[in-house]
Amino acid sequence: MKQKTTGKRLFEYAMLYKKTIFLALAMLTVAVAAELTGPFIAKKMIDDHMLGIESPWVEVVEESEKTVFYKGGYYTRSQNAVPEEQVGSEIQIVQVGRSFYVVPEHLPFDGNRTIEENRLTVAQGEKTASFAVEKLSQQQLFDFYQPEIRPMVILLAFYIVLLVVAAFFQYGKALMLQTAANRIIQKMRTDVFEHIQRLPITYFDNLPAGKIVSRVTNDTEAIRELYVKVLATFFTSIIYMTGIFIALFFLDTRLAMITLVLVPILIIWMTLYRKVASKYNHLIRSRVSDINGMINESIQGMPIIRAFRRKEQTAKEFEKLNEEHFSYQNKLLSLNAITSHNLVFVLRNVAFVVLIWYFGGQSIGAAGFISIGMLYAFVDYLNRLFQPVTDIVNQLAQLEQARVASERVFQLLDEKGEVVDEGDILRYEGNVRFDNVSFSYDGENDVLKNITFSANKGETVALVGYTGSGKSSIINLLFRYYDIARGKITIDGMNAKEIPRQQLRKHMGIVLQDPFLFSGTIASNVSLDNPEITDAQVKKALQDVGAARFIESLPNQYEEPVLEKGSTLSAGQRQLISFARALAYDPAILILDEATANIDTETEAMIQHALNIVKKGRTTFIIAHRLSTIRNADQILVLDRGEIVERGTHDELLQRKGKYFQMYQLQQGKEISKVG
């Protein structure tokens, strides 16, 4: 099946909240439309009202709010006059320098104006015309402007209302888009975290925890910036530019077509930028991941670092990663500094050169006149056009970072996970059989070779052997952390590979040598917040393993807070809680992975006593280095280099005086000179 592109997968996540996003875009469109009416309103005010007094004026019979009293008659602008009310006399007001004059007739053409002794001369190319004029006083000029004040106030009020509407919809747009973005990232982080729970153990063998954490936190945060800032900026800018281009087409089609050249320039620039910046962003995200991994490892190993005086060496290793991250960041910043601002600056200057050339050519051409309002509107729209262009270019770096982060997150999500089967399975008896099982972690070197044994219900089977002999591998296969390619493992006659992992493990419990406690309380660490386990069961499990004695001396007893990894508790106390956790789940098969290795003799005696009670009816596997703890095991399997070399009870194996006998004698502190 063809792999989906990163962009398509990001789009699919966005479409989960499409109603919110589309509503935000609709609000954005309204806000942009309201804002972009400004230059049109300004053009109308300049051309129709501020400079409108130069339009022809005609004398009318009656006075109205649109008339001006001048030399015994009432005059109104020709577009406001009703034909049947016109007297017939027509005048025109013209501006020369800072003064205004009344011409007793309509100018046939316009051009360069000069005044000499109350005579106006208008020249356009080879054409000239001369008129006797009368200069207006300041009061008379104000009278002619008086009818335009009310329409101008109405236009200003209308524009203010539009700005308020735009502000409201801009707020709604920002709120909606950011809400949708946060929801998308919330969903993505949940998906990533849930997917991590389904990944096979082999994945965590090959990737440090810090790098995985980096993908769940840092990389998803970069993607959040994509939705919150980058896409919001792109949406806003595209709609803004579309509105401006529409307005420019209304004003002048030819110039609007010229400004459209900006679009392919931006597309080409974005494509080239991505190719150059992609390399740096991949390296930057990789170094962030490495830094997180090292920090996590250093915190976990802080006692060892201090004990072996590795502080300086660790600091140097960290500084090397930090310096590489700094270097790549600087290269990316240099790329952004060289290109983004300069590109917009050049485009802006070119656009204004074209504007001056275009309007300058028109002003000396046949048309002979470009209105000030038209010029103002074009300059205003061009200024507005380059703000979204700047915003888009400035977000290219963030866009590329988010794209690289997305690739890393989706790479994690593409890792094949285990199928989650929430179905139920009846509690099995606990009869386990390994039949000629061989296993390799790397597919080449076997760590288990032809392992065959049976463990019946209620039996205790001990696995002993030196480090690397294969003891933990047998338990890993029993839990199906790994699957075998050769041999067969059955539980109550059922092939373990055919039982869903979640169901298989439901009736198994395990206690590790180094128990892991979660942040919470003692009670929650036993129940793991499983609603099927009651408080009474939790307390009973803790009492059965002998933990009640120290718990009841704590201030909050069973609700005593537990910090990360149970750092405030002793090793023995943590082990007892871990033991109680396994018992509370009432497993059919119980695994003790060197569970008594880190506890004192008194605590071990308590656990041994509890074990004798709780292992009845359960199949128990014990991995033990202390051979004294497995004296009563029904069967002891001695492993060496992945093979079972001896099997039997404690007494039987001692009588054979083989490998088990050697191990036992060494632990008892006796020197063996000869094995007979």
Image (cartoon, rainbow, N blue to C red):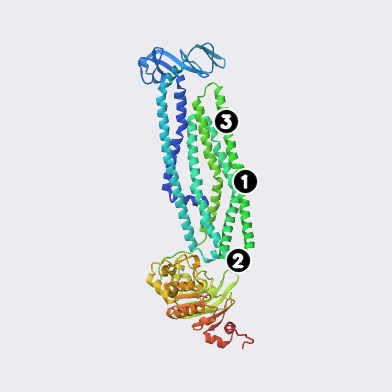
Q: Which residue is drawn at 57% across and 69% down?
A: 441
Amino acid type, residue under disc 3 in the picture: Val
Q: Which quarter of the figure has residue 55?
A: top left
- Classed neighbour count for the residue bearing mark 2: other residues with Cα under 10 Å, few (<14), some (14–19), many (≥20): few
Front-most of residues 599 and 632: 599
- Residue 103 sits above or below residue 619 on the image: above
Counting from the top left corner in percent of width and height, residue 393 is at 55, 42
Amino acid type, residue under disc 1 in the picture: Ser
* Nearer to us: label 1 or label 2: 2
The Cα atoms of the two marked residues, 3 and 1, are separated by 30 Å
The Cα atoms of the two marked residues, 3 and 2, are separated by 69 Å
Mark 1 and mark 2 lie on one chain; the one further toward the N terminus is: 2
Residue under numbered circle 1:
334
The label on residue 306 is 2
Counting from the top left corner in percent of width and height, residue 428 is at 42, 75
Front-most of residues 496 and 549: 549
Q: Is residue 657 left or right of residue 580?
A: right
Q: What element carries label 3?
A: helix
